[in-house]
Amino acid sequence: MSFLSNVKYFLQNLWEFKWFLWKNRWWDYTYIYIMLKYKLEADIKYYEKHSITVEADKIVYEIQEVLSILNKLINTTEIGEEERLKTQLFYDLKKNIRNWWD
């Protein structure tokens, strides 16, 4: 990829994620979950619009399951529940992530 293409994508990404960059605080790991949630929601829209694979419906379902966990994780205040949700989140990501973006 050329330098100019990289600059173009950088500026597009900067505009796309301006809200996140504005609100992000380095000491709050919740923003990692919020960014992942945003990315996965965008991916669902992409899969639903373009059906780029025969497994698009399955992938959308898997991502929706992870989004459900992320929503709970972002909003939980109980440490035990947070640990359970993190374990499930990272298990599901490890199991599926290569199928979603490869």
Image (cartoon, grey):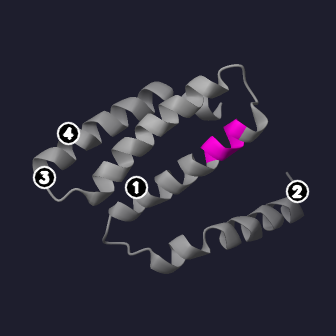
What residue does disc 3 label? Answer: 79
Q: Residue at x 88, y 65 (%)?
A: 4
Secondary structure of residue under mark 2: loop
Q: Which residues are magenta?
A: 43-48
Q: Amino acid at mark 2?
A: Ser
What residue does disc 2 label? Answer: 2
Q: Disc 1 vs disc 4: Cβ atoms closer than 8 Å?
A: no
Q: Amino acid at mark 3?
A: Ile
What residue does disc 1 label? Answer: 33
Sequence-wise, the earlier of marks 1 and 3 is 1
Q: CA distance from mark 4 to mark 3?
A: 9 Å
Q: CA distance from mark 3 to mark 2?
A: 46 Å
Q: Residue furthest top?
A: 54
Q: Residue at x 51, y 80 (%)?
A: 22
Sequence-wise, the earlier of marks 2 and 1 is 2
Residue 46 picture location, percent across and down: 70, 43
